[in-house]
Amino acid sequence: MELNIPELSLVLLIGVTGSGKSTFARTHFKPTEVISSDFCRGLVADDENDQSATAAAFEVLQFIAGQRLAAGRLTVIDATNVQPEARRELVMLAREHDVLPTAIVLDLPEKLCAERNASRPDRDFGPHVLRRQRGQLRRGLRGLGREGFRTVHVLHTPEEAAAAAIRRTRLYSDLRHEAGPFDIIGDVHGCRAELEELLAALGYEIDRDPAGRPANARHPGGRRAVFTGDLVDRGPDTPGVLRLVMGMVAAGTAFCVAGNHEAKLLKALRGKNVKRSHGLDASMEQLDAQTEEFRVGVERFIDGLISHYVLDGGRLVVAHAGLIERYHGRASGRVREFCLYGQTTGETDEYGLPVRYPWATEYRGRAVVVYGHTPVPAAEWLNNTLCVDTGCVFGGRLTALQYPERSLVSVPAARVYHPPAKPFPSVSAPLAGRREPDVLDIGDVSGSRVIETAYLPRVGIRDAHAAAALEVMSRFAIDPRWLLYLPPTMSPVATQADGDLLEHPDQAFSAYRAEGVAEVVCEEKHMGSRAVLLVCRSPQDAAARFGVSPAPGAVWTRTGRPFFPPPLTASLLDRVRAAAEAAGLFAELDTSWLLLDAELVPWNVKAGQLLKDQYAAVGAAARASLPAAASALEQAAARGLPGVGELLDRTRSRLANAAAFTAVYLRYCWATDGLAGVRVAPFQLLATEGAVYHDRPHLWHLALADRLAAADPDLIAVTRRVSADTSDPAPATRWWEELTAAGGEGMVVKPAANLTRGPKGLVQPGLKVRGREYLRLIYGPDYTEPANLTRLRQRALSHKRSLALREYALGLEALDRAAGGEPLWRVHECVFAVLALESEPVDPRL
């Protein structure tokens, strides 16, 4: 016996004591899905049978159930539930969370229940209790549907209970398994000719019936249409639109949600007393001219329309009037009401129309919401939502959103078919409720949260780390309108197992080989400071795109701080802009701005104070103390004092290490004056207007950087590199040895293809292999001593690797959102998260 229950529902087990509810629950549901009244009574009274604790126990039960339902989890209530008032509170809880209440009734014989209770020492109540529960159950059984239960299953015998099998069914709105691609079409309102034209522009092939009428449309590439409702009323051919859309839905080439005009038309078709206004009169006249069979088909079609659809793994929601996040995938009367009519303030405007509440201005959901209902002059993104009703029937356009591409296709209306109740806004009118580009909300970035990315499914951010990021960003960061990206940290290679080296290229090549990466690029690691450059083609372009004026762009550090004072920043960006113009990059990439990832040298340009306080101080102290100590030890050794030789050798070694330490940091420092002496080494083009480039191979990026360097060799440095096969890395290893022997920091090994996925998921974007001498700056002058090397070989890398991947995924997601035209708060969600992750405790030397 199969019992169907919705995947998201509140299931009440109803039955007298001894009917086997707990056994049934254990058999068919996870332990975490079941909330037992007995267990809750034990929580508050240390005694599951203490009836005096029942009221408190049910408060606990309802709280837990509410938390589970809010999280979208099926919840089962294991209690007698025979009293209507007890059920009423739970049905109200289901309605509060917009889930379907389901009843599973175990109506087993009273004698059997009494026998079961007699065998249990904790069931010492009299037979009158069982008779009372049984009477309450029987009296309420036939009225469960009226109480609000959508699904009721009744099991009458132990055999039926034992044979029952639970089948969890998807809600009608749950199409998360449908990934697209889709073409989401706005309100048609009987404009059949424009619909045909739009489908043709989208690449659909239209099938016609014997009378030559469009009856279906299919896309040769497998795309499917999604209609946002309001197919009917006002326009010249409501039956033609219905015939075409009904055919597409029946053939599986389209989905359609209900609109408020369909809801009203359905009442009219069923003979209900409705006011024939807002174009309903035209629809009824047009349908009266059709066959009875067609009208019956229309009634059946409209009756089957769903309030909204959740598609593509929850990343896309389509509803006629839009939908706030907490209603996504939920089922209740108020969810359907919102989907059909939206949210109003209760007021009417000067035209007698309801004033719509601008829900989209407050939307912060991760799912894209596409809707219609309220016509706009042009489809425009607002907080990850898009209205595609562009008023075709009022003389505007019929518009479709191509998903996931986020591109818009529209066709103009042939004429004004129906005068609007109030003047249709012009295309130049600002979108009501739009957030200005520089308006951010602290709620966008604060608190614990989980961010969904296309590269790692879930990246968690803790409250404390978010607070640390907010402190840094609010006090020190550049204007947030520039801040589209923060670079991720980079993982070092695994530690060399023996010898006098801590890091060696062999570990990088073997790591990528294990991930199935055959080709890598080894890039020279410049010893400087990571910098991101946003270079605008002109101040006017900067003002138009980023809303910042006057400014040529921005240069910032890994923590979002300005790299230079404004005058020097302007000079640097002007030089890079001129180089990009001379190299033809703006024209070639059809963009007004470039976002570059780069290294800026020398090291002391940004880290001058750090050098004085940390590195120079160590070197100076060593040079001042160790020679004197060595001299004293030499004199002691000359006098033949015992035990001095070993100490003298160690001191001389430390003196040599200190000299090497000082030589290392001095190698990366030199005097600068303004831009004189400063070098920028770009190695990747991150994004331009409407495009990202992490799918381009690294050699493509480096070739662009070479063109910039050729245009201004005094400022822009070339990043040297070699390509390598991970199965034959010897030439690249020799190159690293030569590079580090000549004083270079080391190299970064990257998959040649750039963004790469392996058998276990996202592959590290780069592994740094630092030279023996450079690592003195990281681990101290004496790290090469055998005892220290042995200890350092135990360094733990797993957290650093995880951090690097998470920050990389967030950075890519931020770039995708920026290039896709998403609002700034969506971009900053990822940018802030990168900075927040930097607060995680990890060895800073890695």
Image (cartoon, grey):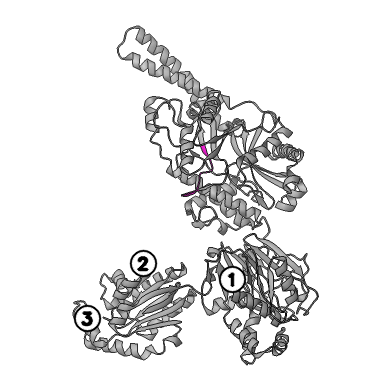
Residue type at mark 3? Answer: Asn
Q: Main secondary structure of the magenta part?
A: loop
- Residue 762 lies in the magenta-colored region: yes
Q: Which residue is mark 3?
A: 117
Q: Nearer the viewer, residue 644 or 76?
A: 76
Q: Is residue 341 above or below residue 696?
A: below
- Side of 471 where 36 appears, left or right: left
Residue type at mark 2? Answer: Thr
Disc 1 from disc 3: Cα separation: 49 Å
Q: Is residue 330 above or below residue 653?
A: below
Q: Which residue is mark 1?
A: 323
Measured as percent of width and height from the top left, residue 526 is found at 59, 32
Q: Nearer the viewer, residue 467 or 294?
A: 294
Span highlighted in magenta in the image: 758-767
Q: Residues within 10 Å of mark 1 (few under 14, many from 20)?
A: many
Label 1: state its secondary structure. loop
Measured as percent of width and height from the top left, residue 441 is found at 60, 58
Q: Earlier in the sequence, mark 3 or mark 2?
A: 2
Q: Is residue 652 above or below residue 316?
A: above
Disc 2 from disc 1: Cα separation: 30 Å
Q: Which residue is mark 2?
A: 32
Query: Which quadrant, please, contains the N terminus?
Result: bottom left
